[in-house]
Image: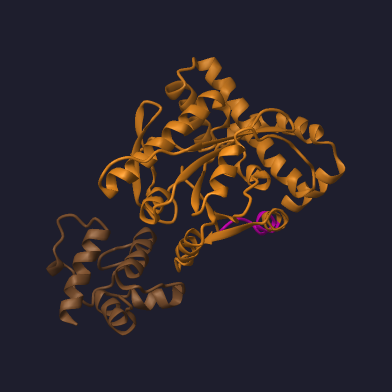
Amino acid sequence: MEELINKLKLEIIDALNLDGMTPEEIEDEAPLFGEGLGLDSIDALELIVLMEKNYGIKLANPADGKKIFSSVKTMAEYIAANRSK
Amino acid sequence: MQRSLIVLMKVLPRVVLYGVMALVVPFYMLINRAGYRATYRFFRERMGYGPLRSFAGVYANHFVFGGVILDRFAMYAGKTFRFDNAENDLIMEKSAEPGGFIVSSSHVGNYELAGYTLHCSGKSLSALVFAGEKKTVMDGRRKMFSETGISMIPLMEDMSHIYEINRLLDEGQIVSMPCDRIFGSAKFVEAPFFGETARFPMGPFSIAVTKGVPMIAVFSMKTSLKGYRLHARPLGMSGVTRAEKVASLAASYARELEDVLRTYPCQWFNYFDFWKK
């Protein structure tokens, strides 16, 4: 899980152009939206596409997305349980 | 008020309501100080008009804006318009190709009326709209949209609109998004516009790059009491990095918007200092 979390952090930094940010600066359980990383709806699409392209997970339900994108840790847990890539 | 306007539109000739509006506009100009200033400055600083011509431009702008609103309710009331859809070919061509695309909307002319007349064979058109509009407007739109096969995507706090846009583009459909107002996400991209850098919403351009879909700028400009002309232009994308691609799309949109406004300067309906940083 630790390895997946670190990989995911790198992918998030790349997808969202978080220039100058390192994986260490993103806390595993910090909120991705609002406080924490301060992501918004544009970033949400990037994360949805990232999940689809990199892990074969298609997200269509906003309620599920809210839970999955709570933090890097929740994303990694969902990926580990549902990935097809 | 809005329901009464639809009823009036059904019983009175349009020209009567336009006449009443011509009398009301000067009072509205007095009340709408911020809008007056922003529009006056647009004519003075961006179009390079003199003071008198700028003042006349503000009146004409407010008059046309009122006309555009009246036309919207006239449409809800079942009235018809003449549309010169010469440039609709581009939309037809894109519609015939596989894959979805994004159509940019702007607060110029009467985009909503254009939506009712766009012919997109084989694809659905869904428009991202501000969810806070008055019920009468939303009901009117829903009625018109249901008759033309267009659906609305309300911008929601839970970001459900993002999932919907993603789904529609994956299915090869058309999504329309406002490109001249920063709403929803606060992120913006800067582009040259009338000789100075202005801020445009990053969302539509970012989504186009992320999803790898083309963008078309569509403007529906009022040409007479009952006439509109549709302008549809492809937006160019260049650059290597994602940021460069987003910036190039925004710059292309800004160029097309400026080009259309130079032809129809009285149809610029962003009543705030667009260039304010």
The shade of chain A is brown
Point out the residue furthest to the front here.
B97
In screen coordinates, is B146 left or right of A3? right
- Look at the image and give the colour of chain B: orange
As drawn, the residue found furthest toward the right would be: B11
Q: At 37% from the left edge and 53% from the top edge, which residue is drawn? A: B186
Q: Position of residue B45 (x, y in %)?
A: 42, 23
Magenta stretch secondary structure, dominant: helix
Taking depth in this image into account, of B27 and B99 the one nearest to the observer is B99
Residue at figure coordinates x 71%, y 28% from the top left: B224
Total number of numbered discs in the rendering: 0
- Residue B186 lies, with reference to residue B32, above or below; the image says below
Question: Does B136 appear in magenta?
Answer: yes
Residue at 38% in and 35% down? B275
Q: What's the residue at 60%, 43% (across, down)?
A: B92
Q: Position of residue B182 (x, y in %)?
A: 42, 48
Q: Give the x, y percent position of residue B217.
A: 50, 40
The percent position of residue B207, horizontal first and vertical second, equals: 40, 54
Position of residue B66 in the picture relative to residue A80 (left or right) = right
Residue segment shown in magenta: B132-139
Near-viewer residue (B184 or B151):
B151
Q: Could you tell me if residue B51 is visible in this image?
A: yes
Colouring used for the render:
by chain
- Image quarter in which the C terminus of chain B is found: top left
Is B18 included in the stretch rendered in magenta? Answer: no
Can residue B274 be seen by looking at this rendering? no
Q: Quadrant of residue A54?
A: bottom left
B61 sits left or right of B179 in the view: right
Above or below, B29 relative to B97:
above
